[in-house]
Image (tube, grey):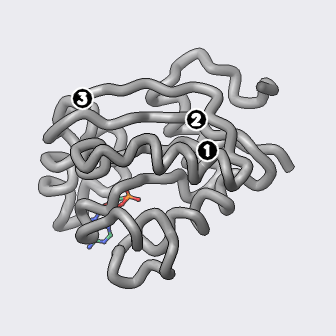
């Protein structure tokens, strides 16, 4: 099934100048960027995005990190896009991510883990609407 997922190239990856490398990996995996913008998230925008984690002990550090510099926010479209992107990213903790995955290659820590990707179709719907309000979730490319 053709799906859409929300991806973020996080501030650590932007600082490392690997935006191009990450996008190339998306495209090579059949994940087409259909919307993309660079933005420096404010603390409150980061808090709204990660609201499901607000009770977690890492919430403050996570949202501080995500508002520490510019990110690139994308909608990726492709066959089974949500799972394909999760496989491409690897485990949340780069130390545990499979060799060759984006987080294994570019991530430094569980916080500075280079990329975010939606973890379910419900999350994808919320996350796409959060950054790209008005995008018709079910429209084609
Ligand atoms: P992400 O996929 O963007 O979703 C939530 C983020 O919280 C996660 O990647 C990590 O970067 C970050 N995080 C920080 N500490 C933890 C932790 N202990 N467990 C899970 N996620 C964490």
Q: In which quarter of the image is the C terminus?
A: top right
Q: Residue furthest right?
A: 1
| Badge 1 density bin: few <14, some 14–19, many ≥20, Cα 10 Å | many
Residue assigned mark 1: 5
Q: Which mark is residue 40?
A: 3
Residue 28 placement (x, y as % from top left): 67, 52
Queried on whether the Cβ of the residue with tag 1 lies below 8 angstroms from ligand 1, the answer reads: no
Residue 42 placement (x, y as % from top left): 19, 30
97 left or right, relative to 133: left
Along the polypeptide, which appears first: circle 3 or circle 2?
3
Picture mark count: 3
Q: Quadrant of ligand 1?
A: bottom left
Q: Please say if 100 is above or below 51.
A: below
Q: Which of 64 and 37 is in front in this view?
A: 37
Q: Residue furthest top?
A: 134
Q: Is mark 2 on a helix, strand or loop?
A: strand
Along the polypeptide, which appears first: circle 3 or circle 1?
1
Q: Is mark 3 on a helix, strand or loop?
A: strand
Residue assigned mark 2: 75
Q: What element carries label 1?
A: strand
Image quadrant in which you'd find residue 41: top left
């Amino acid at each position: 099934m053709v799906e859409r997922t929300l991806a973020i190239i996080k501030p650590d990856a932007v600082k490392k100048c690997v935006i191009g490398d990450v996008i190339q990996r998306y495209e090579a995996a059949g994940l087409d960027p259909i919307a993309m913008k660079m933005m420096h998230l404010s603390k409150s925008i980061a808090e709204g995005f990660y609201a499901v984690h607000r009770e977690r002990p890492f919430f403050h550090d996570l949202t501080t990190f995500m508002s520490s510099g510019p990110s690139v926010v994308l909608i990726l479209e492709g066959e089974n896009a949500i799972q394909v992107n999760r496989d491409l990213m690897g485990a949340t903790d780069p130390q545990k991510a499979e060799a060759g995955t984006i987080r294994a290659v570019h991530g430094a820590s569980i916080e500075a883990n280079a990329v975010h990707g939606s973890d379910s179709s419900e999350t994808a719907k919320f996350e796409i609407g959060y950054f790209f309000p008005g995008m018709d979730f079910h429209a084609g490319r």
